[in-house]
C-alpha cells in the first residue's frame, strides 16, 4: 500500500509481562500507526504480536479512530474486546504513540 503525503508514521512502545508470549520473542510491545498528519485519523496499524490474527484484530479496533481525540474510546474498546495478556501493554503503547503525536504535531 502506498500512503498519501499527508500521512505520518508514529510508534509507541510498552513493556510486557514475563508471562506474555511476546516477551519470548521481543523485549517490548510495539505499535506502529499511520495517520493523517492534520486530522489524526488512523488509517493503518501494525504491531509485534506473536500471531498475525492478533495483530489484525488490534488493527481492526484502531482503524478510523482519531489518535488525538479518541484515546479514551480506544482504551475502552481494547479493554472490552481484547482479552489477551498484553491488554495493558497495548493500551500503554497506543498512549505512548499518542503522546509523541501530540508533542510533534499538535503543540507546535
Image (tube, rainbow, N blue to C red):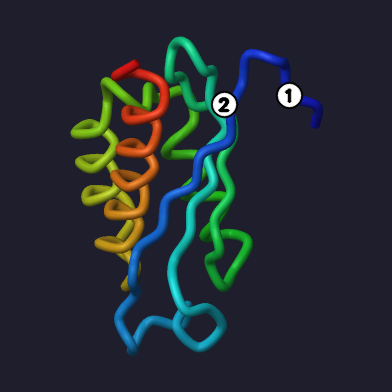
Splitting the image into 4 quarters, where does residue 71 fall?
top left
Asked if residue 67 lies left or right of residue 72, the reply is: right
Residue for point 25% across, 62% down: 88
Q: Which mark is residue 11?
A: none
Q: Which mark is residue 3?
A: 1
Front position in the image: 27 or 73: 27
Task: Look at the picture and state if 2 lies above or below 87.
Answer: above
Question: What percent of the width, then of the height, locates residue 90?
Answer: 35, 56
Q: From the viewer's perspective, is the residue at label 1 or at label 2 nearer?
A: 1
Residues under numbered marks 1 and 2 in contact, where contact means CB atoms less than 8 Å apart: yes
Labels in figure, total: 2
SS at badge 2: strand
Number of residues whose C-alpha sits closer than 10 Å to that of mark 2, classed few (under 14), some (14–19) or many (20 or more): some
Question: What percent of the width, then of the height, locates residue 67?
Answer: 36, 28
Number of residues whose C-alpha sits closer than 10 Å to that of mark 1, classed few (under 14), some (14–19) or many (20 or more): few
Splitting the image into 4 quarters, where does residue 8 fall?
top right
Quarter of the image that includes the N terminus: top right
Residue for point 31% across, 63% down: 89
Asked if residue 90 lies left or right of residue 80, the reply is: right
Splitting the image into 4 quarters, where does residue 50 fall?
bottom right
Residue for point 30% across, 81% down: 17
Give the mark nearest the N terminus, 1 or 2.
Answer: 1
SS at badge 1: loop
Front position in the image: 26 or 61: 26
Quarter of the image that includes the C terminus: top left
Task: Look at the picture and state if 27 lies above or below 11.
Answer: below
Asked if residue 4 lies left or right of residue 18, the reply is: right
The extreme front residue here reads: 108
Report how far apart the C-alphas of labels 1 and 2 lie in the structure. 9 Å
- Residue carrying label 2: 43
Task: Look at the picture and state if 76 lies above or below 6.
Answer: below
Question: What percent of the width, then of the height, locates residue 35?
Answer: 53, 25
Amino acid at each position: 500500500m502506498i500512503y498519501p503525503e499527508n500521512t505520518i508514521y508514529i510508534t509507541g512502545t510498552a513493556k510486557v509481562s514475563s508471562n506474555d508470549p511476546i516477551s519470548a520473542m521481543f523485549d517490548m510491545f510495539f505499535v506502529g500507526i499511520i495517520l493523517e498528519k492534520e486530522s489524526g485519523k488512523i488509517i493503518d496499524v501494525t504491531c509485534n504480536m506473536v500471531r498475525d490474527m492478533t495483530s489484525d484484530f488490534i488493527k481492526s479496533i484502531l482503524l478510523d479512530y482519531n489518535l488525538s481525540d479518541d484515546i479514551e474510546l480506544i482504551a475502552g474498546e481494547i479493554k472490552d474486546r481484547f482479552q489477551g495478556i498484553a491488554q495493558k501493554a497495548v493500551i500503554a503503547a497506543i498512549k505512548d504513540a499518542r503522546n509523541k503525536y501530540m508533542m510533534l504535531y499538535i503543540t507546535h
